[in-house]
Image: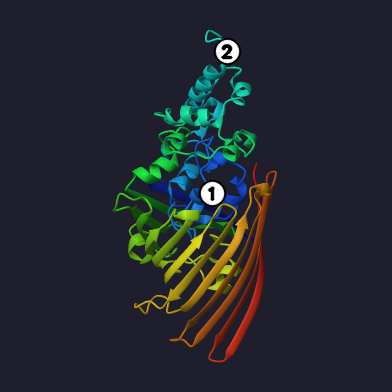
């Protein structure tokens, strides 16, 4: 008797709305740590340290500072312009930003600088010589020129999908090291109309949707008889919205719903009828001094190294999967390299959801150099309805080297239920290669 198997499996991701509702994958921060244009238009002028928002932590790209769920406008910029293998208008992809030297807002400033420095107003080479001439322009004059030149066009783009990183790294433009914007006009002079800084302040509402469909076909050949089994089904759907009810961009109300389905349910409508859950519902006040925030409501606290594979051993041991949501109050800060998040968890009134009470603390740092990162997380909760105490500790580290991205996590879990203690540890290695 001879038997053969052949399986074909595809997962299709379809997104609707103003941007994708991407999952939290920490390797993305390692990958784009050295690319300043991965989050905003090239050529930023910096602001004083207490007003800076630049961070490689989760809140750099996601609405939820704990990571996961819908992206903010900085994350949307990254997804639409960088997280793709090809450009598709149907999928709302946008062109890769051109280097600073190709941007209209930069060319206008260069002309203004060089005209100011040129000894002879009739010189024809003042634009070409602008870079060397700019070194002699006083900071006060640069601010004066920049404040009068707020862009009125979108970011110029390239046709190629993946240009060299050297066009956008921290050495491609050093103004962020030497100039602190003294007024809003100067700051906006390097921000085109479609820059996420502007959009975060101009859009009172934006929504997102993420839909997954798995196509699977298994063929079995036994004794010359071929049989086929269909494993295709609508896996899940996430739909979210962020509301800013006041003319103050720092206050937001966020709602996210999740619909889950299993392989036994083949109809499309089963994806919305089988299991509907709250993914998150919270109030957020963020972008405060030193990039601090406060949050309260229903959400999943940051812990450890998140993996979108809900069947991974680490997620199985920790109990944190695609259904995890907690009632919590939290605060944190991400002033550039370091970050920390504290969440106090409370029991929920609905017994079908978490009854845990305790706290979760995460802290670490993300660096530009080698895209290096490290994080320590501690979880301490108790479910009195089950007489269950749970303590977990996670230590993660990651980096990127050329086209390789590495992350490693050591996870320790201890459960005490009615005096019976279970302990376990798992080490997870994650590597990716760009080609």
Q: Earlier in the sequence, mark 1 or mark 2?
A: 1
Q: Residue at x 37, y 80 (%)?
A: 351
- Above or below, 388 relative to 284: below
Q: Nearer the viewer, residue 354 or 112?
A: 112
Please state which of residues 245 and 416 is positioned toward the viewer in this rendering: 245
Instruction: Give the number of the disc on residue 223.
Output: none
x and y, in percent, of residue 304 in the image: 58, 65
Circle 2 Cα neighbour tier, 10 Å, few/some/many (<14 / 14–19 / ≥20): few
Residue underneath mark 1 = 49
Count the labels in the image.
2
Write down the residue under mark 2.
119
Q: Around disc 1, counting alpha carbons within 10 Å, would you say few (fewer than 14), some (14 to 19), or many (20 or more)?
A: some
Q: CA distance from mark 1 to mark 2?
A: 37 Å
Task: Indicate the quadrant where residue 376 lies.
Answer: bottom right
Q: Is residue 129 above or below residue 407?
A: above
Q: Residue furthest top?
A: 122
Q: Up-down: is 419 above or below 160?
A: below
Query: At numbered mark 2, what does the secondary structure look like: helix, strand or loop?
Result: loop
Q: Position of residue 300 (x, y in %)?
A: 46, 66
Q: Tell me the colour scheme of the image.
A: rainbow
Residue situated furthest left in the rendering = 245
Q: Looking at the image, can residue 209 be seen?
A: yes
Q: Residue at coordinates 30% horizontally, 49% vertically from top-left?
A: 247
> In the shown orientation, is residue 205 left or right of residue 58?
left
- The residue closer to the viewer here, 45 or 13, is 45
Q: Residue at x 51, y 23 (%)?
A: 107
- For the N terminus, the image quarter is bottom right
């Amino acid at each position: 008797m001879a038997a053969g198997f052949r399986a074909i499996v595809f997962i299709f991701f379809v997104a609707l709305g103003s941007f994708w509702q991407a999952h939290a994958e920490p390797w993305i921060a390692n990958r784009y740590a050295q690319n300043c244009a991965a989050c905003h238009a090239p050529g930023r002028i910096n602001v004083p340290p207490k007003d800076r928002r630049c961070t490689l932590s989760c809140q750099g790209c996601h609405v939820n500072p704990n990571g996961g769920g819908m992206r903010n406008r900085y994350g949307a910029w990254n997804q639409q312009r960088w997280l793709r293998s090809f450009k598709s208008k149907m999928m709302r992809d946008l062109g890769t930003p051109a280097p600073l030297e190709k941007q209209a807002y930069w060319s206008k400033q260069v002309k203004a600088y060089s005209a100011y420095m040129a000894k002879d107003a009739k010189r024809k080479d003042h634009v070409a010589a602008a870079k060397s001439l700019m070194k002699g322009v006083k900071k006060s004059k640069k601010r004066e020129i920049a404040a009068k030149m707020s862009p009125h066009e979108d970011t110029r783009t390239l046709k190629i999908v993946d240009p060299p990183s050297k066009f956008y790294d921290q050495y491609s433009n050093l103004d962020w090291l030497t100039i602190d914007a003294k007024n809003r006009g100067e700051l906006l002079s390097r921000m085109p109309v479609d820059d996420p800084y502007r959009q975060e302040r101009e859009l009172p509402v934006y929504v997102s949707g993420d839909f997954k469909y798995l196509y699977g076909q298994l063929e079995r050949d036994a004794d010359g008889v071929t049989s086929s089994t269909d494993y295709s089904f609508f896996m899940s759907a996430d739909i979210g919205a962020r509301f800013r009810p006041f003319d103050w961009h720092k206050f937001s109300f966020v709602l996210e719903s999740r619909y889950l389905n299993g392989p036994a349910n083949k109809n499309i409508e089963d994806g919305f009828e089988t299991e509907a859950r709250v993914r998150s519902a919270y109030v957020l006040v963020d972008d405060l001094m030193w990039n601090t925030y406060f949050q309260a409501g229903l959400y999943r606290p940051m812990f450890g190294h998140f993996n979108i594979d809900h069947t991974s051993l680490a997620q199985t041991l920790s109990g944190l999967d695609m259904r995890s949501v907690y009632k919590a109050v939290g605060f944190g800060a991400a002033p550039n390299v370091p970050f920390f998040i504290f969440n106090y968890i409370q029991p929920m009134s609905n017994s079908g959801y978490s009854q845990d009470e305790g706290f979760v603390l995460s802290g670490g740092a993300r660096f530009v150099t080698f895209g290096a990162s490290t994080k320590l997380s501690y979880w301490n909760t108790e479910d009195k309805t089950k007489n269950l105490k749970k303590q977990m500790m996670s230590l993660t580290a990651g980096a990127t080297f050329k086209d390789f991205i590495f992350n490693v996590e050591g996870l320790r879990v201890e459960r005490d239920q009615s005096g019976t203690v279970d302990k376990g540890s798992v080490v997870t290695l994650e590597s990716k290669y760009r080609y």
